[in-house]
Structure formats: structure tokens, C-alpha cells
Amino acid sequence: MKTLQVLETAYRATVEEQDDTIVWLTHAMKGAGGDFGMLLMGNAVCYAVKEQRAPALQIGGWKQSRVADPAADVAALADKGVAVYAIEEDLEERGLLDVPLTEALNVVSRSKVPLLFDEYPRIWKW
């Protein structure tokens, strides 16, 4: 069944080695044959900004060797055939309409979100 992942909370667990848990979960479920789309809204629209990286974390002599890269993870979802959407007004509020965004990103206005919801029989909001 076609499922739309609506991702609003951003940067959860990304200080650690793993990537955003829901983006990772969507990769895994798509790899298992699931049919998914992803809508980025609120602060999660920041995941669509290309070439952003969190700085490496260092505590004493220990340094996190692999930092999360949500933009690359979202782009990889699109490469797997997951339709990725972002709400235009949320991008605009954050000053992101004029920065390089993931090429496969579909920008939709908030007023068109109900039409997007009609395309997916199952919607999960995170």
C-alpha cells in the first residue's frame, strides 16, 4: 500500500552516528519493497538543502568519525524512486527558496497538501 511519510521534526538522533531515524526507516522499508513518498514540512525542509553537513562532534580525545548527512540521505531516497516533497511556505519561512536544493525535490504549496494526501491511502506523520 502506498504510504506518505510526513516528516516535520528534524535532526533527531543526528548528532550520533545514525542518520535521521525516519529517513533511515524509509530507506529500509523501500528496500524491502515498500511504496513510499516523503513530505518534508516544518524544520524538516532543511533536509532538502544540498551540501550541508553537521560538524564532527569531539569529546575529549574521542571524535565522532561519521557525521550524519540528511541532505544526501534524502537525495538517495529520491534516487530509489521515493517521491520527495517540501512545503513551499516552510522553505520560504526559513529563507531556503534561493539556496541549492535536492534536484528531485517537488515543492508544493501548503494549499495543495490535501491533494497530495489524496494520492496516498496511508499517511504516517513523524
Image: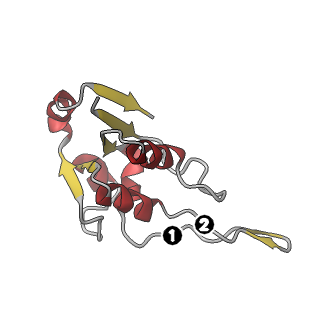
- Image position, residue 63 (x, y; %): 75, 72
Tell me the distance, in whole angstroms, between the alpha carbons under discs 1 and 2.
Answer: 8 Å
Q: Nearer the viewer, residue 7 or 90?
A: 7
Number of residues whose C-alpha sits closer than 10 Å to that of mark 2, classed few (under 14), some (14–19) or many (20 or more): some
Label 2: which residue? 67
Amino acid identity at mark 2: Val
User: Of discs 1 and 2, which sits in the foreground?
Assistant: 2
Report the residue that reaches farthest toward the front.
32
At x 40%, y 41%, the residue is 7
Q: Is residue 119 left or right of residue 45?
A: left
At x 29%, y 29%, the residue is 1
Report the residue that reaches farthest toward the top.
121
Q: Nearer the viewer, residue 3 or 116?
A: 3
Label 1 secondary element: loop
| Quadrant housing residue 66 | bottom right
Circle on res. 53: 1
Amino acid identity at mark 1: Arg
Are discs 1 and 2 less than 8 Å apart at CB? yes
Report the residue that reaches farthest toward the right.
60
